[in-house]
């Protein structure tokens, strides 16, 4: 009787523990083109994404220069030549993340792979590099919307992985990060003066050097700028084409009204408009 009660209690405890413990690590599906890295303990889990969100580079508007430079860097990487880690910064919704995702569509059949890593999982980035360093594919480690708050020390793991660690850099991996902040960390007005500021920093210049040292480890900087009306309409036309639609006068006016209602013009706003417009029936495609 006591044994049966003990076994029942043990089974109950194990079921509850199973909900708290991370899943058992398994060999990744190396046939996939995209993955997500999640830190677990001192290591992590590389989860394959069978249906990644990607599309042709031709869908992007008003970023031709940025596309050209990142494509050149990526092709150097794929050809086994020296290439840089890349930091894409600037206005929101202008195609930073989309550009990185589109690279997978263009170069996946040439062995390019994309690994999404959240900033909270960067602390175990060295463990990820150990997993992929012997693979024949080329990996872009994608950190989207990367920024760090005051007092957040997790950026130090990324600094070491990018450049400055004792171990040799992984030859088949680059880091492409996007951010609305060029220096990735908050900056304050008192840091632009020669005084110690209200927080009493004895060597304020050293604090500034510490902040910009992370962005300096990205060899390629690409800046993205707000869209004007023509850029916005070009983005709308590009996305409409993917649904077999064209930018006629009614659609043009509806797209402009949509941007006015949102108070912004960007590639993201264009995509959101097209999602709404393409989802309507022909009879519903009228001006609101």
Image: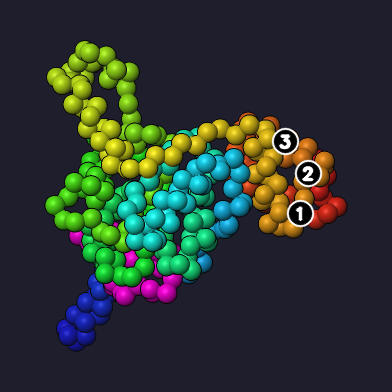
Span shown in magenta: 24-48
Report crowding for label 1: few under 14, some 14 to 19, many 20 or more residues within 10 A (C-alpha).
Answer: some
- Say which residue appears at 45% left-offset and 51% top-offset: 72
Report crowding for label 3: few under 14, some 14 to 19, many 20 or more residues within 10 A (C-alpha).
Answer: some
Which residue position holds label 2?
A: 251
Q: Secondary structure at mark 3?
A: helix
Q: Is residue 244 above or below residue 89?
A: below
Label number found at residue 259: none
- Say which residue appears at 27% left-offset and 20% top-offset: 191
Please report whichever mark, 3 or 1, sits nearer to the chain's N-terminal start.
1
Query: In what quadrant of the picture does the C terminus appear?
Result: top right
- Say which residue appears at 26% left-offset and 78% top-offset: 11
- What x and y, as percent, mark residue 12? 27, 74
- What x and y, as percent, mark residue 97? 48, 48
In space, the residues marked 2 and 3 are separated at their CA atoms by 9 Å
Please report whichever mark, 2 or 1, sits nearer to the chain's N-terminal start.
1
The answer to whether 16 appears left or right of 103 in the picture is: left
Q: Is residue 136 magenta?
A: no
Q: Is residue 73 visible?
A: yes
Q: Secondary structure at mark 2?
A: helix
In space, the residues marked 3 and 1 are separated at their CA atoms by 17 Å
Label number found at residue 256: 3
Label number found at residue 245: 1
The quadrant holding residue 262 is top right
- What x and y, as percent, mark residue 50? 48, 69
């Amino acid at each position: 009787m006591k044994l049966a009660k003990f076994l029942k209690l043990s089974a109950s405890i194990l079921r509850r523990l199973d909900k708290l413990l991370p899943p058992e690590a398994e060999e990744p599906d190396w046939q996939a083109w995209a993955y997500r890295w999640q830190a677990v303990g001192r290591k992590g889990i590389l989860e394959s994404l069978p249906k990644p969100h990607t599309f042709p580079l031709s869908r992007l508007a008003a970023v031709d220069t940025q596309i050209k430079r990142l494509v050149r860097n990526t092709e150097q990487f794929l050809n086994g030549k020296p290439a840089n880690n890349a930091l894409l910064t600037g206005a929101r919704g202008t195609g930073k993340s989309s550009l990185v995702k589109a690279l997978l569509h263009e170069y996946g059949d040439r062995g390019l792979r994309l690994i999404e890593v959240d900033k909270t999982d960067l602390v175990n980035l060295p463990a990820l590099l150990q997993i992929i360093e012997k693979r024949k594919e080329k990996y872009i480690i994608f950190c989207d919307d990367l920024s760090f708050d005051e007092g957040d020390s997790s950026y130090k793991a990324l600094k070491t992985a990018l450049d400055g660690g004792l171990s040799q850099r992984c030859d088949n991996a680059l880091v492409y990060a996007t951010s609305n902040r060029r220096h990735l960390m908050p900056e304050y007005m008192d840091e632009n003066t020669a005084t110690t500021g209200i927080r009493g920093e004895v060597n304020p210049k050293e604090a500034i050097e510490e902040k910009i040292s992370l962005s300096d480890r990205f060899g390629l900087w690409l800046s993205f700028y707000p869209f004007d009306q023509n850029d916005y309409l070009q983005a709308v036309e590009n996305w409409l084409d993917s649904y077999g639609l064209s930018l006629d006068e009614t659609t043009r006016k509806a797209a402009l009204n949509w941007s006015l209602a949102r108070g912004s013009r960007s590639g993201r706003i264009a995509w959101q408009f097209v999602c709404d417009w393409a989802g309507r029936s022909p009879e519903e495609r009228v001006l609101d």
